[in-house]
Image (spheres, grey):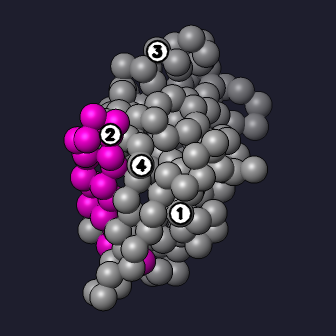
Amino acid sequence: MHDTPNPRAVHVQSRTDGALTYLVDLPPEALPAVRRRDLAAAWEAARAAAAASDWGSPRFFRFRRADGSSTDLALADPDACCWAGAVDRTVGMASSYGLSLCLRLLALVDLLATARWASPLFALHRDGAEIEPALLAAAATLPLTQEARFDEIAIRARLAAARLPGPAARAAQPGHPA
């Protein structure tokens, strides 16, 4: 149920140094959307793996395009390896769905770390994170870019269409932490 119509699109090879190589028969922007709840669960699994110092292995990706060109991506950062390992252990990354889930998680983390406009849409706590559901839904469903990131303009447009209340209005909602 998790996979797309092209379940053979991801070929995984183990390297002698413990790293994993993924040969993907489609580009990042063609990876499928995922369920919002699966993205939220991947976030929690990654948080738990980081808390347990379960750092994971480096991962290398080659995304093949129909025209014969390719896009290469390397995950060597310990945090990114940790998060990818958590997704691999819980959902698996040998399918286009699992790979999409992992890359969307990493793209969301990147967006939250670099996009100042997104700071009112999430709160990090010692025991987890609170992410605006509309942001999580956008990250789960909008296509990735050629570089396996999110197009900030598309994310902002989706959030604007959702007509999110401003930070002050959200803080005044019952049950919302200030």
- Label 1, label 2: how far apart the Cα atoms are: 18 Å
| Residue mark closest to the camera, 1 vs 2 | 2
- The quarter of the picture where residue 140 lies is top right
Badge 4 amino acid: Asp
Task: Write down the residue under mark 1.
Answer: 94
User: Residue 15's x, y, as percent?
Assistant: 32, 81
- Sequence-first disc among 2 and 3: 2
- Sequence-first disc among 1 and 4: 4
Residue 160 against residue 50 in the figure, above or below: above
Q: Is residue 176 magenta?
A: no
Badge 1 amino acid: Ala
- The quarter of the picture where residue 45 lies is bottom right
The kind of secondary structure element at disc 3 is: helix
| Residue mark closest to the camera, 3 vs 4 | 4
The kind of secondary structure element at disc 2 is: loop
Q: What's the residue at 55%, 55% (across, down)?
A: 8
Task: Write down the residue under mark 2.
Answer: 65
Task: Write down the residue under mark 4.
Answer: 25
- Label 2, label 3: how far apart the Cα atoms are: 27 Å
- Label 1, label 3: how far apart the Cα atoms are: 32 Å
- Give yes or no for contact between labels 1 and 4 (Cβ–Cβ under 8 Å): no
- The quarter of the picture where residue 91 lies is bottom right
Q: Is residue 71 magenta?
A: yes
Tell me if mark 4 has few (under 14), some (14-19) or many (20+) residues whose alpha carbon lies within 10 angstroms of its own.
Answer: some
The kind of secondary structure element at disc 4 is: loop
User: Residue 110's x, y, as percent?
Assistant: 35, 46
- Give yes or no for contact between labels 1 and 2 (Cβ–Cβ under 8 Å): no
The kind of secondary structure element at disc 1 is: loop
Extreme residue toward the bottom, this view: 16
- Sequence-first disc among 1 and 2: 2
Task: Write down the residue under mark 3.
Answer: 157
